[in-house]
Image (cartoon, rainbow, N blue to C red):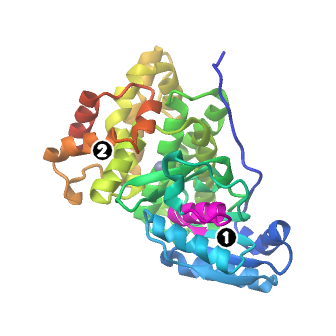
Amino acid sequence: MPGKFSFHAPSRVVFGAGRLAGIGDDVARLAGTGARVLIVTDPGVAPLAARAEAVLTEAGHTIETFTEIKSDPRAASIDAAAGRIRDARIGCVVGVGGGSALDVAKLAAAIASADAPAEHYGLGANPLPRKGVPRICVPTTAGTGSEVTRTSVFTDGAGRKIWAWGEALRADLALLDPALTVGLPASLTAATGVDALVHAIEGATVRRANPMADAPCLHAIRLIAGGALARAVVTPDDIEARGAVQIAACLAGLGFDGTGTGIAHAMGHALGALAGVHHGRAVGVCLDAALGWNAVAAPARHAAVARALGAHCDGLAETEAAAQAAPAYRTILDQVGLPISLADTGLAPADAGRLAALTLAPENAPMCAANCREVNEADARALAERLLAA
Ligand SMILES: [Zn+2]
């Protein structure tokens, strides 16, 4: 019998190769015919944003485009997007891109009705305005799950990677079109897919893990570990594999949205802030360093993860099955070619103290607290040392 938990689901998710062609009707449903639409996108996916713009224009909507987005978006970028929404009286925001573009689209749409800047809402300091501008998320990567989560991650003026959270951040529609992900380079396909896998594993193992979240999280793990991510990396235009990974990322988002993430995301965010390591790679290698250590503290949950990863656990005691999770996870990292060593990032074992301190800093502390195993200073130091020695 599980303890108390809550599970939140978004209003609507649609899926299909070529589904982008129907977005004109989606906008009309949310904001009326002839709506003023702001497409929020990062310059790296300009051709995909242009496709969305063409479809929306054809459907009779008026389009503006906001492209001032980098990965790990800045608070200033969100404020600029919110300003455009206000000034142009935008009726619907369409985020097209990876997690950064979707996070900017969600937060800008949520705060545009008030005057306060994004940082006002950082780390939950103040409640988000109740009524935002309707928004649609169209992911062009398959990883963050941002299209269904109530979180936006951004970088504040001091360079800290922080987050805003709340029901008001939810997208009105998540539009999953796997055809939009076929152009993603292999290294990014691997890194973003590993991010989804880490969301799923952490969602199924953190303190707030529960049966409602287990269902999407464990199935996301099965889809990714069943070969879909490896196929998407090796055969970029395998639309079936792309679709499976995109659904897995969305399922993982549904799961971890209610449970939170753990140590891999705490240390992963610290790695991002310290050395600019891509989020997916960062959380992927951090979980590699922590998974066996975590499994000891929550054997039943990790045994379930090991089985979902495809490890052979027949006849094994629960603690033995749990110990299979870490090697099974590493096998997938190797299959998709995720670099384990961080030597190329400029970090050395001597940086372990700084990395450990940042992992425990206030902006990452909630993720440490959510982890299935308590993380004290010595633990964080030991994990950081293991990670940087790899
Ligand atoms: Zn993540």
Instruction: Give residue 333's position: percent from left, percent from top.
Output: 39, 47
Does the image show residue 238?
A: no
Q: Nearer the viewer, residue 377 or 343?
A: 377
Q: Disc 1 marks which amino acid?
A: Val
Q: Furthest-left residue in view?
A: 350
Mark 1 nearby-residue class (10 Å; few <14, some 14–19, many ≥20): many
Real-space CA distance between mark 1 and mark 2, rounded to the nearest whole angstrom: 34 Å
Cβ–Cβ under 8 Å for marks 1 and 2: no
- Per the image, label 2 sits on a secondary structure element best described as helix
Q: Nearer the viewer, residue 321 or 280?
A: 280
Does the image show residue 40?
A: yes
Label 2 beta carbon less than 8 Å to ligand 1: no
Q: Residue at x 57, y 81 (%)?
A: 47
Q: Furthest-front residue in view?
A: 115
Q: Residue at x 67, y 48 (%)?
A: 167
Instruction: Give residue 311's position: percent from left, percent from top.
Output: 47, 31
- Quarter of the rendering containing residue 136: bottom right
* Magenta stretch holds residue 105: yes
Question: Horizontal placement of 97 versus 198: left or right?
Answer: right
Q: Disc 2 marks which amino acid?
A: Leu
The quadrant the C terminus occupies is top left
User: Please, what is the dominant secondary structure of the magenta stretch?
Assistant: helix
Tag in front: 1 or 2: 2
Mark 2 nearby-residue class (10 Å; few <14, some 14–19, many ≥20): many
Tag of residue 336:
none
- Per the image, label 1 sits on a secondary structure element best described as strand
Tag of residue 94:
1
The magenta stretch is 96-116
The quadrant the N terminus occupies is top right
Residue beneath label 2, please?
358
Q: Residue at x 22, y 45 (%)?
A: 354
* Magenta stretch holds residue 98: yes
